[in-house]
Amino acid sequence: MKMGRWITIFYLMTIVPSLALAVTRSPRTPPLEGTRVLLTTALQGGAVEAVLSVSEVRGGSRSIVDGTVQETDADVLLRLDLHAQVNQVLGLRNAGEFIPYQGVRARLENLSTHDVTELALVPHVSSAAGWSYASNVRLPPADRMINPFQDGYRVTIQISSQPALVLHEDVLPPSSLWRSNGFTTIMIANVRLGPVQALPITGESEVTTQVEAFGLIRSSLSQSAFDDAVAQYALNLESFFQGLEDATQYGLDRRLTAPLLADVDENVANALLRREVRGECNGNLPECRAWANEALHRGFVLGVIRDLDDAVTATSSADAVRAWDQGYVLHLPLRSMLLNSELACLTGAPQEPALLDCAMVTGVDDAFISGANAMLLGNTAGAAAARDIIVTRVLKSVYYTLARLVTQAVRTGEQGPRVAAHAAFITLWHLLPYSERVALERVLADRGTLTEVEARDFFLTFNPSMMDAGLNAAELIHAEDLLEVLP
Amino acid sequence: MIRAALLLASAGLLAACEDEFDCSTGGCDGGTSVTDASVPGQTRPQVPVLLEERLVSGGFARVRLELLAPEHADAPAEILGGPWLPEPEADVRVELQVQSTTALLGGRHQGDFVPYLRVDLSITNKDTSQVLETTLVPAVSIARGLAYARNLALLETLGTAQGGYSVAVTIRRPAFAGEAEANAFSPGLVVDEDLVGSVAGTLLGERPTQLNALVTLRDLGAP
């Protein structure tokens, strides 16, 4: 009898756990690299934080797939970490403490096929991740030939308090966290659940109109239809460009100031209206066209930088994804500039030592993808590194553009390239702090007025550093050429 | 042993209790007269009475079992183990704090509440052997945090006991997902594969944790 009791205890303590059921990853599903945070949101006035993530499928005491006990393979583990954000709030003691006794529902809609899966996330305890609400999920559609990570998903998360929970009088009237009237939606967003393979991450962007306006204005300018360009600018771009003049939106270390950014809108507007821009344009159509083109590019370059800075510093993953997507979409009008620079780099003379890196377009594409994936894995440093790659390559591209225009202006003596070079130089001037802020700090101390001496000093420093960044030696800008071109 | 599941306070249950044991007229078997101390709301512990406090779960959790004054609470009508007794009808609140001591077994900080446990309470009148069996249910308080608790009309239900009341609390692991025992307070937990092999001997393991204590009439504030 005594032996039988020990056998029973041994069974309960050892055998039962070993019977834990494993859930296997579906053959259609590529592996995930770690936990990917999909969404974060603050609840209860910031007292509570909800973090939604996906990771590899997990087994445990029970095989849970789509919210119920069943033995089948699945694609991902969907987990909602619901915890206090601060100490001693709502009856919870510690910041980070799990909030139990909530019902959690998830809805996933495949944005391509519109197949839907609805499931419950059940209480889950893990050594690594603590307490949470989770379930393995078979992503819709169930077709085993489809890689589910290729599609975007619209995810909706709802929570509801356990109706049976007892609330002492000091909790009354109760927070909706403890006594809710049915389910409340706390998260709804378009997400990618696996490695990002294409952008935008969410499949949509709020700046599509601005990008389309860029193309329409460029098209109008090529036909000298300035009035059409003005109308398009006023309708779809003016407020966007004015918004770019707010220096507080950019990373502090960029040292962009309100005076420096004050003419972002003004330069484009005046060029399109054929008014004077820094002593040029003023009714001269080729000059106005050159200024408008370059100033439009400058605005989109600043837009990319602003949004990528925003993505890297965003406090919620949804905001980060939205900003990263916006930065990506805003860079699309710059791709022809990137491509031209890549060609100039490839056809130029090799540099010694060979540090040449001409991959402007693919380099930027790869950085956008790798940065998005780093961001979704919570790797802020990785996202920041990708942002820096993008910004540096855009800067190099502007440099190549300037070099081409300076060379063209000196060789031909034409006014069009000279004015365009001047405008491109202003763009470069805006970008300088991004990669050269330490070395060029002294020169940049007073950027409001660029003297010849300052310009010469600038290039004495800037040329070698750009060579280090992979510029083609043949494309180096000579200070005397630049000074000949600049007004 | 006579076991009476006298679980308090819905009108029907209370009526059944009175019919069977007629505690209000001193007719409970065992025969101890009921004094004024048995009037609900008049006999209450004035300060928390600590019944038991110790480490459990292999040291990963600390439990603290206390008697407190009953407290008004917002509780649903249907509740596992019997309805929540309104504060005026109760003479005591039994509360069990179960808190992590370390960032293990799902806890992240010392003091984190350990949720979804199933807590059974058994109180025996040592004079009469009459037993009250119920559950402690999750309750939220700003001042005391999350705990397992219940208001009781102890004297009315079990009668006075000069020899005191033996209190037994049994803490069982959360019901696992898919188990028939899952309920509103323990709706079905999944223990992750990184933990499932390590739960033996803890609050998440199969072996229940038992707490035993003695409550005296003095603890209840009786004269």
Image (cartoon, coloured by chain):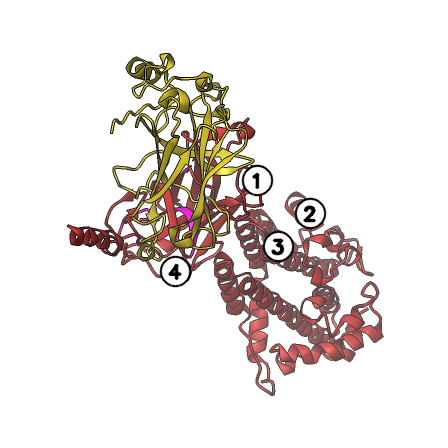
Residue indicated by mark 3:
A310
Q: CA distance from mark 3 to mark 4?
A: 26 Å
- Look at the picture and state if A30 lies above or below A164: below
Locate residue A136, reporting x and y percent. Answer: 33, 49
Q: CA distance from mark 3 to mark 2?
A: 21 Å
Q: Quadrant of the C terminus of chain A?
A: bottom right
Amino acid type indicated by mark 4: Leu
Between A15 and A396, the one nearer to me in the picture: A15
Amino acid type indicated by mark 1: Val
Q: CA distance from mark 3 to mark 1?
A: 30 Å
* Nearest to N terminus: mark 3 or mark 1: 1
Amino acid type indicated by mark 3: Asp
Whether tag 1 and tag 2 are in contact, CB under 8 A, the answer is: no
Q: Nearer the viewer, mark 4 or mark 2?
A: 4
* Nearest to N terminus: mark 1 or mark 4: 4
Which chain has been coloured red in this picture? A
Chain containing mark 2: A
Whether tag 3 and tag 1 are in contact, CB under 8 A, the answer is: no
Which chain has been coloured yellow in this picture? B
* Nearest to N terminus: mark 3 or mark 4: 4
Q: Nearer the viewer, mark 3 or mark 1?
A: 1
Residue indicated by mark 1:
A89
Chain containing mark 1: A
Residue indicated by mark 2:
A238
